[in-house]
Image (cartoon, helix red, strand yellow):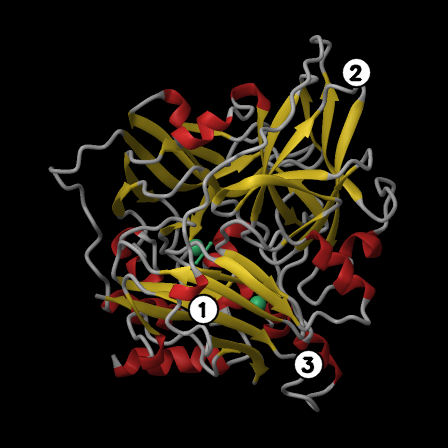
Amino acid sequence: MKRRTFVQKLCATSLLLGASPKLLQAQSMARITPATATPGFIPDIEILLRAEVGEAALRDGEPTKVWRFAGEIMKGPQESLQFLHGSEHIPIIRIRKGQKLRIHFENHLPEDSIVHWHGLNIEQRMDGHPMYAIPPGARYVYEINIENRAGTYWFHPHPHERTSFQVYQGLAGMLVVHDGEEEAAGLPDMAHEIPLMIQDRSFDDNNQLVYIGPMRHNWMMGFRGDYVLVNGRVSYARTVDRTAHRVRIVNTSNASLYHLRWSDGSPFTVIATDGGLLAQSREQATLTLGVGERVDVWVEFSGFQAGEQMHLLAESYTPSLQNITAEQGGADLQEGARPIASFQFSDQAPIQHAPPSHLSEQPVLAEREAVNIDSPRPIDIAMRRGSFYLNNRLFGAMQDVPEENKVKLGSTEVWEFSNDSSMGMGMGMGMGAMMQMAHPMHVHNVQFKVLSRTGTRQDDALHQRLRAGFTDYGLKDVVVVMPGERVRVLMKFENHTGIYLYHCHILEHEDLGMMQNYLIEA
Ligand code: C2O
Ligand code: CU
Ligand code: CU
């Protein structure tokens, strides 16, 4: 135990990162027995999910070596497991609320891994906390009661210090939950549902993925890609009918933030955020999506001509809010943004639909029930000694929970994330730039309500512009906290006790230790 703490400290303070064999060895000593199948658990859907080394066509030319999820349905309908349209390596799992899901996860990678089900309210042992990482060749059996409401969730590896690398290599998938309430709303589905996963990547001359080097500075800045891929493709395109569609958008990039709009200037009709459907749809001109965030939009294509095209345009930003798209220039730019997905209209006769006026009943999450409404639990973000700290701490030993990170099952709390960029002044120019970062903060096991966002720089046009695209409504599990901002969120700890995480979802930051355990106690 002592030795492990020492090795972790050593690693956290050294300038170089990456596979520290000592560290991996030390962690394997404390290995927890992987979960196996329970005879009493009768799954509705059972899947064999492998994480493996393979290749995929990400852009024209040579196939790219990737790490990928692949799998088979062992029980349940074939539609329960497919690849995203356009992709050869990004799965989408579909299930209904109330169903039981068993996943046999097999690690065929050359290193430890474990899968986290992002957004789910789930038992501790099924959450994919890094303490459960399994070695190459091992298997971990997930048995999950799907308790979440209909929504767009996702999954990705979560082994400590390797999450960023493994996701970058291609390991991510969508997890869509359906339910009766969603059906009653009568939303477009099947061929009229368009899941889009956004990720940025860089390639070498042989079409192979290029990731950032081991220098701490690069990790603090976060990975920035030269290309924005949708569903694993550079220049994603799809033919669609001229009717209403539901578009599910998820940002699973390592670090980049996107500011999205439609090429024809029409606003987005937002129908759902991270935790499912809103009560009513809302219109906004643009969408700003930090890492991990999801937005579902309703889009009506009936006004277009057959053969015509519409594009989803994106500007990408680094966590320090540099406009990558503008810097990269290039012929595909449209007024500072570039098309990342193109929709070409089929010659099917157009059919018009209006979004339903009522989408869903919002789960009750009452501010007056919060135990700490007048003194929100502070989560302070600060940079010191080449790392980002949460409440002055880096992620420590796997199972250690700081005394003040304990909450009560059944309680409702307000948390306040503060991205106080005034701290750590006088650290030199490079450091100064790093302070000014937007951090997408994520809490495991809950869906929260955003109560307030204050401190947005009034004098900064970019901050104002990005802020206009945030979807601070409905239920969320990630919220982007801009430099100087304080964001208060309300959440209730339900159904499960145990150790869960909260962290910055910039994967490089998370791996640098910008992550904390918290404990839900009975
Ligand atoms: Cu998608 Cu711990 O996160
Ligand atoms: Cu998560
Ligand atoms: Cu961060």
At numbered mark 3, what does the secondary structure look like: helix, strand or loop?
A: helix
Horizontal side of 331 relative to 391 (left or right) equals right
The image quarter containing residue 144 is top left
Residue extending furthest toward the left: 39
Q: Earlier in the sequence, mark 2 or mark 3?
A: 2
* Amino acid type of the residue tagged 3 in the rendering: Met
Q: Are marks 2 and 3 in contact (CB under 8 Å)?
A: no
| Residue on which the image places disc 1 | 414
Up-down relation of residue 421 to residue 240 (above or below): below
Residue extending furthest toward the front: 368
Q: Is residue 172 visible?
A: no
Ligand 2 quadrant in view: bottom left
- Residue at image position (69%, 45%) is 228
Q: Position of residue 20 (x, y in %)?
A: 42, 70
| Residue on which the image places disc 2 | 307
Mark 2: give few (<14), some (14-19) or many (20+) Cα within 10 Å: few
Q: Position of residue 133 (x, y in %)?
A: 32, 57
Mark 3: give few (<14), some (14-19) or many (20+) Cα within 10 Å: some
